[in-house]
Amino acid sequence: MRAMRRFTTTLFLLALGACASSKSATPAAQTAEVAAQAAPAPPPPPIPQDPLDLVAGDLSMVAHARVDVMKDKDAFAAVRRTLTRYGCVSAQDFDWLAGQTQRALFLSRGSSEHPEFAVILAGQFSDPDAPRALEMLGRRVGTGDAPTTRTQGRFTVQQKGPWSAIVLENRFMIAGHDGFVGSTLDVIDHPPEARYAQSAIFKELGDHLGCLDRSLCALVSPDGNVAQRMKGELSSVGMKKVGRQIASSQSGFTVAVGDGVVLAVGAHAQSEDDAKELAKDTKDWLWQAGLVARLAGFPNVLGDAEVDTAGTFTDLKIKVGQGDLARLEQRFDQMIGDDAAARCASPSAAAMSGSPTESLATAPREVPLPVAEARTAGSTQGS
């Protein structure tokens, strides 16, 4: 009996030990679970340093402007006068944006019926600049929507009707169609496998044109909404065949701003024969347009244009010195100055153009192309 009692006591003590061990293990497991929940989440991806790293996707056009370089050039004053006179941009808005911006990217996507636009400005900005940019857009397109905000992940976006804007780390300001701004922010938190800077058009035509070394460079994707508009504009001034060829090719242009300006247009055709045909058609048109321009009292800048081919590339270069640039400005103002002023005074002027950035880069539709080309053409003393 004594042995039985001793055996029973031993079993009881072992059971108590197991129970105590089980009770003490439970808090340890819970502590580990709580510790895992309290562990800090990995930091979000950093905002890129280069504004080009914010650009991804299938875009119709990407334009890159080195505003900091242009500011120091004599011809920049002519650019400012042109935009404030004919582009429906107030001097206050232009000086505010140009004063804070070092580089600018203008982006276009979507169809011809429903285009979308956005800008990415790199420089020194503060949070109040985003609502000011929206007010500027609102004035240009005639929207009376009240300003609001929305949250997208870690970002708080300012919004006004279909437009939105945001300042990132006081280094970037992104503004434009709300969906476009949103997808640009997605590039930060969800980096794509390939960015625009790795695309074929940027590597091939961009390198050929020396895109990032120029004051302004724009690359236009084949058959996109910008290419189709270019095709229509060129067709309206007698360049139907050239417009068709350019619209189906990688195309782009650069502007070098110095004491004059240089306009270079390039197209990457599908074959060497196509490139040579495009060069021939362009030369034929330039001869005719140059004759009309001279009869209209413009300097002979088109007559001195250079057209060359190199493999599958076709290149056009137009140079305008400072003296010719001043004469072009004067003649241009005589022709459409009053009409442009009346157009910009209309509340719906920018809304009719289809985008807030469009009238910054283009002359009114009624301007003959030789005049528009001459106004944005250039000299060799720029970058």
Image: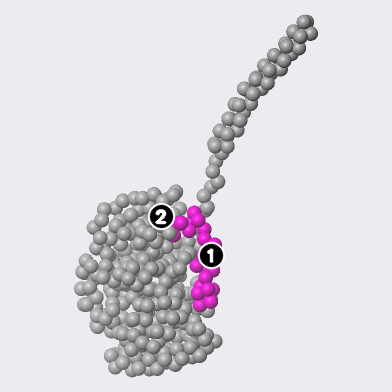
Disc marking residue 194 = 1
The residue that appears at 72% across and 15% down in the rendered structure is 11
**Residue 256 visible (yes or no):** no
Magenta-drawn stretch contains 374: no
> CB under 8 Å between callouts 2 and 1?
no
Is 297 situated above or below 169?
A: below
- Callout in the foreground (2, 1): 1
Is 378 situated above or below 349?
A: below
x, y percentage for residue 87? 30, 72
The residue that appears at 50% across and 67% down in the rendered structure is 196
* Tally of marks: 2
Q: Quadrant of residue 7?
A: top right
Task: Report helix, strand or loop for mark 1.
Answer: loop
Relative to 135, 52 lies left or right: right
**Viewer-closest of 5 and 283:** 5
Is 169 situated above or below 242?
A: above
How far is the residue under mark 2 from the one under mark 1?
24 Å
Q: Magenta part mainly helix, strand or loop?
A: helix
x, y percentage for residue 94? 33, 66
Task: Report helix, strand or loop for mark 2.
Answer: strand
Q: Residues within 10 Å of mark 1 (few under 14, many from 20)?
A: few
Relative to 24, 43 lies left or right: left
Name the kind of residue labelled 1 in the image: Ala
Q: Quadrant of residue 281?
A: bottom left
Stretch of the chain drawn in magenta: 184-206
**Residue 182 visible (yes or no):** yes
Name the kind of residue labelled 2 in the image: Val
x, y percentage for residue 324? 36, 85
Residue carrying label 2: 167
